[in-house]
Image (spheres, rainbow, N blue to C red):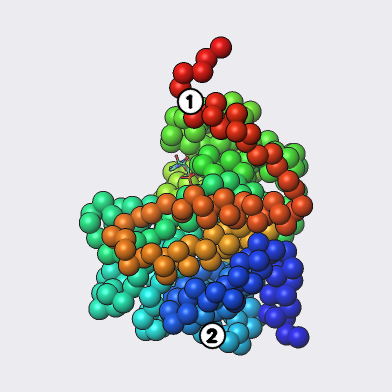
Amino acid sequence: MKSGELKMRWARQYMPVLAEIRRTFQEERPLSGLTVGMALHVEAKTAVLAETLAAAGAEVHITGCNPLSTQDDVAEALGMVPGVTCYAKRGVGVEEYYAAIDRVLDAAPSITIDDGMDLIHRLHTTRRELLDSVIGGCEETTTGIHRLRAMTKEGELRFPVIAVNDTPMKRFFDNVHGTGESALTAVMATTNALIAGKQIVVAGYGYCGNGLAKKAHGLGARVIVTEVDARRALQAHMDGYEVMGMDEAAARGDLFVTTTGNTSVISGRHFPKMKHGAILANAGHFNVEIDIDWLENHTEATEDRDGIRTYCIGGKALHVLAEGRLVNLATPKGMGHPIEVMDLSFALQALCTAHIARHGSELEGGVYEVPAAIDEQVANLKLGSLGITIDTLTEEQVRYMSSWDIGT
Ligand code: NAI
């Protein structure tokens, strides 16, 4: 067996929820006759999702959603799965990246699955002639949903898209535990540096930042959080972290990880204040959180270690991982989120894709929540796979919870 197939086999054994859904899909074929276009990080877990959609009867066309996150051996293995065509390649330039997005769209997908909204953006700009053939889509990440909501506000979004990211079964696990663990794993594997005792600066205390801070603290790091939202800043303070602005934190950090989904969070005014040897990584979706252009234009750069670019500034060395692209996937050893977490996220994607196939044409253009029944189904399947049983409400409790006149 080749390495890509071995990686897929490895992933499959820790994805019991998706396996259960695949069994049902094989019988019911809910995507029969439909073409699904996907732009996701092409690695083993994504490959298991793609084969699950193919097992449901779809013709799947897939490419990456980041120029550095594709694993070529998995892309090759995925290309061998019946019903799947894969265009992803690691280390492509911007032009080649969008050419692959266009090849997915050439298949005229009826359903899109995005991680960052690149397929949908292309469909609404240079490929508008294909819009009428799309029933709907699913979006995997926070940044993609920000972009979709901005489109909806301007009346631009032409079909319904399910915000998979925003449902509890996704963001409570994938964003918190997945990003928390995998971003730190990638930093450690790329640098060989110790986390214990380090001063880590986490920019953004949303779902991802919260998980990252918690895991770093668990490994013995001292954590500083930077925020722009007063409520989230206060939450970080009460969770036990130091909170301050990046201007102050810049001089304190040994390791910086951005998780804001925003731009220029660490910029030209911060770099000169940093310590010699500071490590900078981004876990947010796009490579705009750390101002790499400023570093490229104002400093000397060297590549001393795989996946690390070192910038020399005022005699100090600053080390940026994976060109400021999302560290858990774009570093050479980045494997993305742990498998069990993606089992949940991709179970949601699979069920939401089937939901769009059934109901997409009844819905207007806009962003939709994951149906509560799907969220609960994934939770129940996961609990079942773990052999965990929980209590159920008694009749008395149901009555109590739905009444307004029962007091003390
Ligand atoms: P979120 O919206 O829950 O959190 C973002 C936080 O950043 C908010 O609290 C916001 O107030 C804060 N923020 C915004 N601008 C800031 C600034 N200039 N300085 C400091 N804080 C700022 O979003 P979530 O779910 O935590 O996602 C964050 C990013 O991570 C998104 O780009 C998302 O797409 C990406 N993501 C990455 C994953 C990965 O595998 N690395 C997985 C899941 C999400």
Disc 1 on helix, strand or loop?
loop
Residue annotated with mark 2: 83
**10 Å crowding of disc 1: few (<14), some (14-19), many (20+):** few
> Vertical placement of 219 versus 39: above or below?
above
Mark 2 or 1: in front is 1
Q: Quadrant of residue 337?
A: bottom right
Residue 222 in view in this figure: yes
| Residue at point 65%, 62% (across, down) | 17
Q: Residue furthest front?
A: 395
Picture disc at residue 403: 1
Q: Which quadrant of the rendered structure holds the C terminus?
A: top right
- Where residue 377 sits in the image (x, y, percent)? 58, 54
- Where residue 130 sits in the image (x, y, percent)? 29, 78
Q: Which quadrant of the rendered structure holds the N terminus?
A: bottom right
Q: Amino acid at mark 1?
A: Ser
Which residue is more in the foreground, 348 or 330? 348
- Where residue 283 sits in the image (x, y, percent)? 55, 54
Q: Residue furthest left?
A: 155
Q: Amino acid at mark 2?
A: Gly
Left or right: 274 in relation to 288? right
- Where residue 220 sits in the image (x, y, percent)? 75, 39
